[in-house]
Image (cartoon, helix red, strand yellow):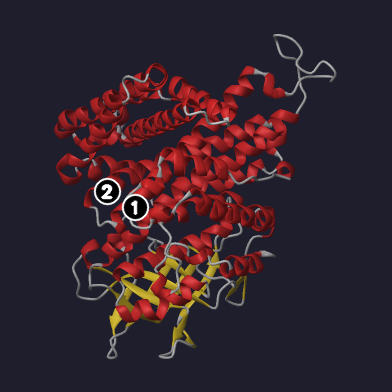
Amino acid sequence: MPTYTAPTKDMQFLLHDVLQVSQNDIPGYDELDRDFTGAVLDEAGKLAMEVLHPLNTVGDQQGCVLENGVVRTPEGFKDAYKIMCDGGWTGLDMDPEYGGQGMPYILQTATGEMFSAANMAFQMYNGLTHGAMSALAEHGSDQQKATYLPKMIAGNWTGTMNLTEPQCGTDLGLIRTKAEPQEDGSYAITGQKIWISAGEHDMSENIIHLVLAKIPGGPEGVKGISLFIVPKFLVNDDGSLGARNAVSCGGLEHKMGIHGNATCVMNYDGATGFLVGEMHKGLRAMFTMMNEARLSVALQGYAQGDIAYQNALGFARDRLQGRDITGAQAPNKPADPIIVHPDVRRNLMDQKSFVEGARALVFWGATLIDQAHRCKDAEADAMISLLIPVMKGFLTDKGFETTVLAQQTLGGSGFTREWGLEQFVRDARIAMIYEGTNGIQSLDLVGRKLGLNGGKTVMAFFDMVKTFLKENEDNAELKSGFLDPLKAASKDLQAAGMYFMSDGMKNPNNALSGSYDFMHLFGHVCLGLMWARMAKASIAALEAGDTDTDFHATKIATGRYYMSRQLPMTGTHLARIMSGAEPVMALDAANF
């Protein structure tokens, strides 16, 4: 059976040595001292390890069952959910006015990683609710917030997001779900939504669906989409539950992974709905959920990679096979542990260097979200908007790859259910698909985000890298192993951007054909920047006499590995980008 250890020590290093959160002027960050964050992370880690992780295999094996319109979650899920609600984890960063604890989003992110790594399918119920709460908090009326947020924050009610329909996924302009105005100001919602995570289950009293629909007579395409609250049970004026609404689960999807999460077909048969925000402005409100959801999915990618790596490492330390080519390392045993072999080391270092770099990137992204929301900082908001498709696409691609590498470490054992690695592979796969496939992320990055604010935001990223290089050029230990590779990778990224501006303007297919490589190129540069920042922090800690020399020496060595073995991939991606559209578009459709 697989195991999980919460990486609280590495999280503390990121929060306080790299990001230096308690010294940040973001409101609320002054309270994030080491003792406070340590207490929060330790408790979340215990919940993840002792309550959620033991249910991960249970959820995978039992799955969800639909009976008479009600979805039964796997054994133990309801009890675990109650423990999570009682501990206040469902409203960690939500507004205290509605019962939340008001902590910064960075702590929501850190705890969410541990919950997701321990049991991704379970954590999805909380993740969807959090996204729905965020959308209501920003776009709902005062009455809507007062009616729904306290119960959702407490965990009594959960939430969903309903976008996809049988005939359309990404192209939301094709949705057919209708919202007919009623005399009392409500709307009658009719249509079908598919692939709705947590759409029906038995863990909460009520489920608050946020549904995209079109009001008859509105503009065509996406300009005519509105957002509606459609509760499973209608809510009376006194806050109590009323009649069952005309919304039902028509079936459960039989999926490759995340079996413990109910992925539903939802039927709306004239269900009562309530408009959120302005008429025909539903996408603006929904994208409040989408950006947060995409960061959470990026987190899922590396979180599954982390638990897979942890188990691969344990196996490599214990499994005896062959002898070290330089001489026996365990002469009193019949063979050496496989971790002595260079190729196994390469495999493990690929995993470790990715997971730790990805964690740093997502934590930094969470601070940008805090800065954008708590300081009303438009530049921070633009920067995280630029980086969201990079994080979602790159980290889920590499996260899945990491689970496969971990599975490979176990050899034949990794292919069996007994060892649990195959579940991590299956669960991680969905992260590359939902909340916008990674191909869509790359198109969003190149087609929309590069031009954000007239290109000023991507230039601000380049300036950030240049400033870091300039400020640290006298740090000899940092320069050769970190700054020089980062500088070279950043030049590759800039060259790709310039190619898009020149050849992409002449032939848009040149840009679109290279968009996926550009997303990965950008992702490598981001992780290179994160590793340079982490190495700087560890070098400084050692120079200051930090006694945990093993931790910091390991961090520096792992970073050097990424910079020398992974970051040079930017050159490959650049070469592929500059080959243009011709190799991609050469065949007629009939010749494939």
Residue 518 figure quarter: top left
Residue 476 figure quarter: top left
**Amino acid under label 2?**
Ala
Residue lying at 36% horizontally and 20% vertically, measured from the top left: 475
Q: Nearer the viewer, residue 483 or 527?
A: 483
* Circle 2: element type: helix
Quadrant of the image for the C terminus? top left
Left/right placement of residue 566 relative to residue 218 reads right
Residue 498 at x, y percent in the picture = 19, 28
Residue holding disc 1: 369
Residue 561 at x, y percent in the picture = 49, 22
Left/right placement of residue 552 relative to residue 218 reads right
Image disc number at residue 380: 2
Label 2 crowd (10 A; few <14 / some 14-19 / many >=20): many
Q: Nearer the viewer, residue 586 or 48?
A: 48
* Circle 1: element type: helix
